[in-house]
Amino acid sequence: MTRTAMMALACGAAALAAGTVVANDNSNLIYNPGFEEVNPDNPSLPMGWGGFNVSPSDYVDINDPGAHVRSGSKSIRLRPSTGPSTAFQGFTTNVFMPDGSDLYDPDYVYLGGDVHVSGWYLVPEGETLANDLVALKLEFRREPPNFSIYASFEFPVDVSATNGQWHHFEVTVTDEDMLAVGDFPPYATSVSILPLRFFGGNYATDPLPQGTIYWDDLCYIQGDLPQGCNVADITAPFGVLDLADISAFVSGFTAQDPVADIAEPFGVWDLADISAFVGAFLEGCP
C-alpha cells in the first residue's frame, strides 16, 4: 500500500465506508476538518477556525458562484493579495473554544510519534500560484497559559496548476525534526494548523501574487499510520477482507480518493486500481 493511501486510510477510511469522503473520523484530531460546521457567533468563519485578513466570502459555500468544494458543502480559500492589508492571509485552529477552557489546536505529545497532516487543495483551471508564499504551517505550541511557539514548520504547496482538480497533499514532522530544534522546555503540547499565503514584496514595483487556492478535508494524526494486510484491506477491522473494504474502495474510486489509488500509475484512478483491488481481495489476508 502506498504511503498516500495509508494516510488517506488513517484520515478517512471510516468515513469512506459510510459513503462520504470527508476526513472526519476519530483518528483525525482536527475539529471541523472539512469546514462544514458554521460558527454560530460568526457565520463568516467555520467553527474551530480563525481568520487572518480574509473576507466572509473566503468561507466558501457550494452554492456560491464559481465555488470549489471537495466534499460536503463548505471549503476555505485564499485569494491573491492586492495591498498591504492582505499581505498575510490565513486560517488557523489557534482560537479559543467557546468556554475559554482550551484552544482548538490539536493535541501533541512531545516525541510521542511523527505528526502527519494531509488534505486537499485546488487551484482553479487557468490559474497558477505565483509571486508569494503559499503554504501549510504547523506551529507547535507550549501548554496554556504560555501558548508560545516551541517550533514551527512551513510546507509550501506545489505552485503548478491543478487544472481545477483537487490535489492531495501530505506533510510530516518527525520526532527527529523536533529533536533538531533543541531542548527548550516546556515542551509543545499542541499544534496550530495554518493554511496561509504571504507576500513580502513591494506592491508598487514587484510582480503581484497570482492564483486562488481552495483547501478542504484536512487531517492531523500523530503516531504510526495504520496498515492493512494488503492493498485491499483499507478499512477496519484490519486483517479481515469484507464488504466494508469493497464499499470503501468503490466510494474512494468514485471520488478519486488516494485510498483507492493502489496501482501504478499513481494519481490516476483506472482499471489497474480495480484489478489490483480485486486480486488482493481474492488473495485474502494471511
Image (cartoon, rainbow, N blue to C red):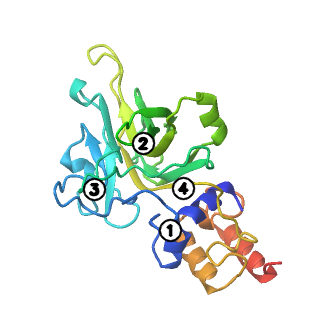
Amino acid type shown at disc 3: Pro
Question: Residue beneath label 2, please?
Answer: 143
Residue designated by label 4: 221
> Where residue 38 sits: x, y (%)?
24, 61
The image quadrant that residue 241 belongs to is: bottom right
Three-letter code for the amino acid on which mark 4 is drawn: Ile
Q: Nearer the viewer, mark 3 or mark 1?
A: 3
Residue 30, quarter of the rendered image: bottom left
**Separation of residues labelled 3 and 2 (CA atoms):** 24 Å
Crowd class of label 2 (few under 14; some 14 to 19; many from 20; radius 10 Å): some
Q: Earlier in the sequence, mark 1 or mark 4?
A: 4
Q: Nearer the viewer, mark 4 or mark 3?
A: 4
* Label annotation for residue 46: 3
Is 252 displayed left or right of 130 in the figure?
right
Q: Nearer the viewer, mark 2 or mark 4?
A: 2
Residue 134 placement, left or right of 277: left
- State the residue position of label 1: 255
Q: Mark 2 vs mark 1: which is more N-terminal?
A: 2
- CA gap between label 3 and label 1 equals 24 Å
Dividing the image into 4 quarters, which one contains the C terminus?
A: bottom right
Q: Position of residue 96 (x, y in %)?
A: 28, 49
Residue sitting at x 29%, y 63%: 37
Position of residue 261 in the picture relative to residue 135 (left or right) = right
Please tell me which of labels 3 and 2 falls first in the chain: 3
Residue 145 image position (x, y, % from top left): 34, 40
